[in-house]
Structures are given as C-alpha cells and as structure tokens.
C-alpha cells in the first residue's frame, strides 16, 4: 500500500503528463488497468449514472462504498472525485478526507461548487477555509494522500479566468498538492494557468470541442489528464443509440461494433475472489 501511494505521488513529478482515466465500476476499472494506465480516478457523474441517479444525488455511504469498489478492483492507485464533500463547512471538508482515506484511496479532490445552482460557487474565503481544513486533515493521516483542489468557475457560468487563477493560487498556498479548473477551452488558457502555479495541474479532456493531445497538454505544462465522465457517457451513448436502433428501426447493426466475448474476458481475472462475488 505504501509503495502504491508513493508511486501515485511520483507520477505528478515526472517530466511528461500522465493520463488518469475514470472508470465507473469494477469492470471498467479492470479494463483500464489491463490497458496499462498507471492510476485511476473515480467519476462522480459516472458513478451516479450507474446507480440511476443524477450527479450529486448519491449518498455519503454510497460514494464511500463506490470508492472502495474501485480501489479493490485493481492494484492501481485511485483518486476520488468527491465533489464538495459531505457538507459545506471546513470541518466537513476535513471529515470527508478522513473518511475517503479509510477506503484505501491514494488521493481525492474537493471543489468549490456548492451543489446549489442558484449560488453555485462558495465565497472565496469559505472556499479557501475548506481547502485549508482538507489539507490539514491530509497531513494528519498516517499514509500519504495526494489532495486535489478544484475551482469550478468555468463550469458554472463564471468565465473569469483571473478569478479562477486567484482561487487556484490560494488553494496552492493552502497546501493543495494538485490544482484543477475544469472547463479550460484553449491551450493558451491552460498554459497561463500552469504558468501561474508551481504545483501540478490536472486538466480534463473528453468535453466536446477539446481535442488536445497528451503531447499538446504536456507542452503547456499540464502534469495530469483525466477524462471525467466522458468514458461513462460514451458507453451510455452507445447503449442509447443501439436501443433506439432496435426500438425504432427493428435492426441490430450495433452488434458489429460490440467487443467480442473472448476479448472482453481477457481483461478480467480467471478466478474470482470473495470480494468479487455477490
């Protein structure tokens, strides 16, 4: 476990950016691990969709159980998308980190999105206090834990890059290990964010119209690249297109694009453990 945690932190200091894809269940986690990725991250939206819920509606217990599921699916380090955590106060942010670490996670992120569409972003002072409390909780843990602080301005209609950078710099000063502002749409903005910070920056790909390569992002200064709910949305999009084909046209051409049974099973262990069994 110690080696896994150390390896995860080390990924953030290597010269080039690395990709940390986001599975939404045990099967997708094992497939991504088999394909050679060095670490995994949960997706709050993908998790919710797999439960038949909208993002943000899963309970605390369900989120923590999902974290354990992804952690135990492979031997890779896992970072969790914990949204704003299990409350709004700095104290709740600290408790969220402690609870997350107990699941075996190598890291986690907290964001400054409140969950309230009428007031979507925490006031600056409260946002910083929450990150500070989370960092203090991380430092008090027995094991290493890579903490990511997220600024959600750009996803909630606050297209103010200056304020986004100001928040990320404050989160960095509070001790966050990784900084993350989803919604950056061009390499110039990404480069500006990276140049404005000294800690590693995570950028999310998989949003429509954002097709930068790993090489592009690495050259801009990015250290970590996640894909959020994109893989889960791709899977569900394929499912819906196939279902519509059946329902509306009475055809089954989608089967030509389905992964073969033998190829799919290659990604899974030959024997099941007690943890795998229902």
Image (cartoon, helix red, strand yellow):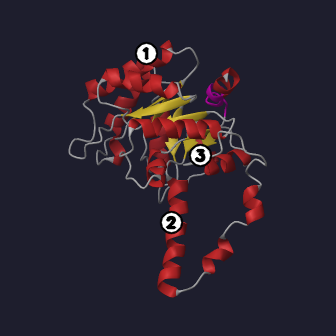
Q: CA distance from mark 1 to mark 3?
A: 27 Å
Relative image position of residue 69 (x, y in whole percent): 57, 40
Instruction: Return the mark for residue 237.
Output: 2
Residue visible at 50% across and 37% down in the picture: 65
- Boundaries of the magenta span: 8-15
**Which residue is pictured at 44% across the width and 17% down the height?**
137
When the figure is inspected, residue 201 is found, relative to residue 134, above or below; the finding is: below
- Residue depicted at x 74% and y 57%: 265
Q: Determine whether the residue tagged by mark 1 lies in a helix, strand or loop.
A: helix
Left or right of 254 in this view: 186: left
Residue at which label 3 appears = 21
Please state, as top left, top right, bottom left or bottom right, where the N terminus lies in the image.
top right
| Residue named by callout 1 | 136
Residue occupying the far left of the picture: 118
Q: Earlier in the sequence, mark 3 or mark 2?
A: 3
The verdict on residue 145 being magenta is no
């Amino acid at each position: 476990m110690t080696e896994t945690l150390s390896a995860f932190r080390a990924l953030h200091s290597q010269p080039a950016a690395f990709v940390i894809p986001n599975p939404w269940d045990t099967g997708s986690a094992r497939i991504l691990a088999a394909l050679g990725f060095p670490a995994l991250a949960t997706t709050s939206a993908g998790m919710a969709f797999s439960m038949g819920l909208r993002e943000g509606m899963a309970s605390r217990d369900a989120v923590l159980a999902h974290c354990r599921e992804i952690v135990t699916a492979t031997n890779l380090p896992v970072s969790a998308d914990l949204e704003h955590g299990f409350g709004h106060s700095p104290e709740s942010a600290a408790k969220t980190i402690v609870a997350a670490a107990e699941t075996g996670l190598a890291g986690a992120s907290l964001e400054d999105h409140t969950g309230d569409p009428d007031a979507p972003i925490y006031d600056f002072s409260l946002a910083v206090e929450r990150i500070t409390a989370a960092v203090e909780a991380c430092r008090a843990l027995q094991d290493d834990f890579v903490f990511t602080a997220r600024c959600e301005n750009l996803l909630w209609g606050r297209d103010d890059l200056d304020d986004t950078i100001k928040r990320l710099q404050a989160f960095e000063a509070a001790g966050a290990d990784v900084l993350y502002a989803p919604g950056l749409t061009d390499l110039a903005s990404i480069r500006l964010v990276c140049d404005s910070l000294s800690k590693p920056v995570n950028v999310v790909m998989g949003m429509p119209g954002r097709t930068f390569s790993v090489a592009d992002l690495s050259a801009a200064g990015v250290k970590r690249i996640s894909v959020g709910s994109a893989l889960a949305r791709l899977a569900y999009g394929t499912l819906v297109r196939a279902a519509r084909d059946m329902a509306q046209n009475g055809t089954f051409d989608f089967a030509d694009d389905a992964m073969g049974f033998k190829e799919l099973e290659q990604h899974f262990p030959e024997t099941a453990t007690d943890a795998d069994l229902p």
